[in-house]
Amino acid sequence: MKIALISRVVLAAAVGLSAYAAGRESFPPGVQEDQPAQERADADVLYDLVRQARADLREMRAGAGLPAYSAGLEAGQRESHERESAGEHGGRQGGEERGGEEGGRYLPKMTKQNRLFGNGARLALEFDPRTQVFVGSVTNTTARTLAQVRVEVHLDNGTELGPTKRIDVGPGQTVPVELGAFGNEFGAWVSHPEAGVEEGHGRGGEEGGEGAGEHGGGEGRGGETGEHGGGEGARPRGAAYRPAYNQLQILRGEMHAFALDLAAKSR
């Protein structure tokens, strides 16, 4: 059965990534280009494998007569439409906000973010408690291509989620964003989109020394636990594997929600 295959994928990926997180030293900031090509290729294969498992799970939901979850792009477009309907400064929860700093202040758990950042990327994001996934979108509001766009979320328990896989976003283009928070207990969060080579990051911008305090105004919120705090296990130290680990966390949340939905339907 597909559910057994998905379970094996999750188990193998979790074991492999956990071993990698515990057993490998991280690369210094700015030297991601020196990572072995085979490691990056392996990370891409794992990423695609988990994405396929998620697609299989969506088919199973449809076969069981369960509704599909809103995709990140759909959630972001809905948020954008609501913002436009309310006016550019219409007081949306979470705020229509402009800012050049990476993070800003922490938002309460269920607050919807819709924010234009200094690099020209608009990030619309909200937490879906059913799947324990942050869903939304990034829109390029500039007239130039934003290269290597990726998004992270920092929880107030000290855990960092992501980043998403790097992608070039054309002028006016909107792309979906999903960040898995499975197994985390938290009350607030902060997020930011990065593009290209951000100051202080180098090419491997997600590498090394990124505590929760470094990325925006949540002073005193879980900074002592850093990237490995709060959730189940630890995200890989190597940046190449972090987008795959994010997909794994999303899959775990979707599998948990699927099990609950099936149980509710059978009652």
Image: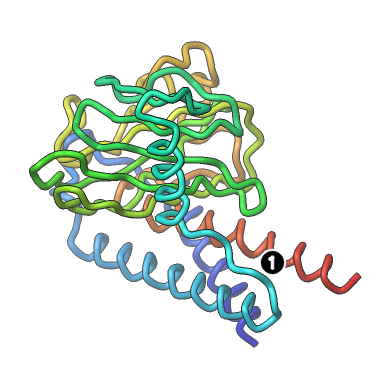
Using residue 41 as the reference point, say whether residue 223 is left or right of it.
right
Q: Position of residue 220 (x, y in %)?
A: 52, 12
Residue ID at (33%, 27%): 209
Which of the image's four quarters has the N terminus?
bottom right
In front here: 57 or 175? 175
In front here: 99 or 95? 95
Residue topped by disc 1: 258
In front here: 173 or 29? 173
Q: Position of residue 22 (x, y in %)?
A: 47, 46
Query: Is 138 located above or below residue 200 in the figure?
Result: below
Query: Is 102 located above or below residue 44 in the figure?
Result: above
**Mark 1 surroundings: few (<14), some (14-19) or many (≥20) residues within 10 A:** many
Q: Position of residue 111 (x, y in %)?
A: 56, 31
How is the structure coloured here?
Answer: rainbow
Using residue 258 as the reference point, say whether residue 156 is left or right of it.
left
Q: Position of residue 248 (x, y in %)?
A: 50, 59
Q: Residue furthest left?
A: 144
Q: Residue furthest right?
A: 267
How many dots with numbers?
Answer: 1
Q: Residue furthest top?
A: 219
| Image quadrant where residue 114 sits | top left
Residue ID at (35%, 20%): 214
Which of the image's four quarters has the C terminus?
bottom right
Three-letter residue code for mark 1: Phe
| Image quadrant where residue 183 sits | top right
Residue ID at (61%, 48%): 132
- Tag 1's secondary structure? helix
